[in-house]
Image (spheres, rainbow, N blue to C red):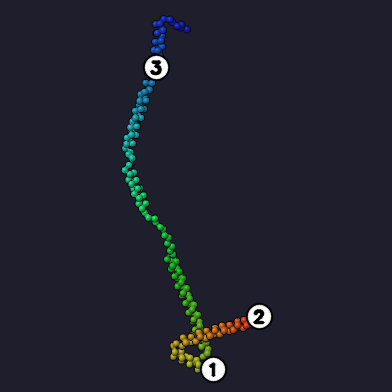
Amino acid sequence: MNQPSNDPHEVFMEITSNKIDTQDKRLDAIEGKMKTLPEQLTLMQALGKQMEAVRGEIKATRFPTERVEECTRKINEGITVFGHLSKCSVEHHHYIPKVIWIAAGLFVAFSLVCTGWFYTYKKLNEQIANDTKYRQLKLDTANHHLQVYLGWLDSLYIANPNLRKTVLQVENEYRLNFERLERAKQLNAEAKELEKEAKKKKKK
């Protein structure tokens, strides 16, 4: 173990030597770092070039302010127009297709034709029945008065075209008289019933 020297010169030299050694170590560390600086400088330069390229692209890609302003103007105009529009009312019109109308018309026409055919057939049957009855009366030659009367009726029908109208009126009058008689009989019977009930109440 070195013993401390009392000589000031030696002490100074020792301290100076220690400081020089410390500085040498620091310089060595700095030199080591300096050796890595070129690589870092290269990376920094490449990064700077990329940043310049990005700035160029940003400058080239301009924000479409004109289109945005035009779109905003059109939106405002649309809002103004819709604001002044009156309220629309929706009316529902129900209609029937033409096919249904045609089918309904054909059905009504067919019904009328069928009704006409029915009444024509019924009238024809009545005429055939009346003609058959008249012919049967004509065949009764034993009744001379009947034959004369039928001949008179034939002549009267030929001479008076309105004979059918007259006969229908007389038939209608007979029918009304018959209904009146039936009604009178019914009222007479009801009156007799009421009279009987009144007599029973008096006896009680």
**Res 15 seen here:** yes
Name which of mark 3 and mark 2 comes first in the sequence. Answer: 3
Q: Which mark is residue 85?
A: none
Residues tagged 3 and 2 counted as in contact (Cβ below 8 A): no
Q: Is residue 54 above or below residue 2?
A: below
The quadrant in which residue 159 appears is: bottom left
Residue marked by disc 2: 201
Q: Nearer the viewer, mark 1 or mark 2?
A: 2
In the image, what residue occupies the spot 46% across and 72% down? 108
**Res 128 seen here:** no
The residue most toward the top is 7
Residue marked by disc 3: 26
Q: Nearer the viewer, mark 1 or mark 3?
A: 3
Q: Which mark is residue 143?
A: 1
The amino acid at mark 3 is Arg
Q: Residues within 10 Å of mark 1 (few under 14, many from 20)?
A: few
Q: Pick the quarter of the image with the C terminus.
A: bottom right
Name which of mark 1 and mark 3 comes first in the sequence. Answer: 3
Q: Position of residue 195 (x, y in %)?
A: 62, 83
Comparing 33 with 16, the one in front is 16
The secondary structure type at the circle numbered 3 is helix
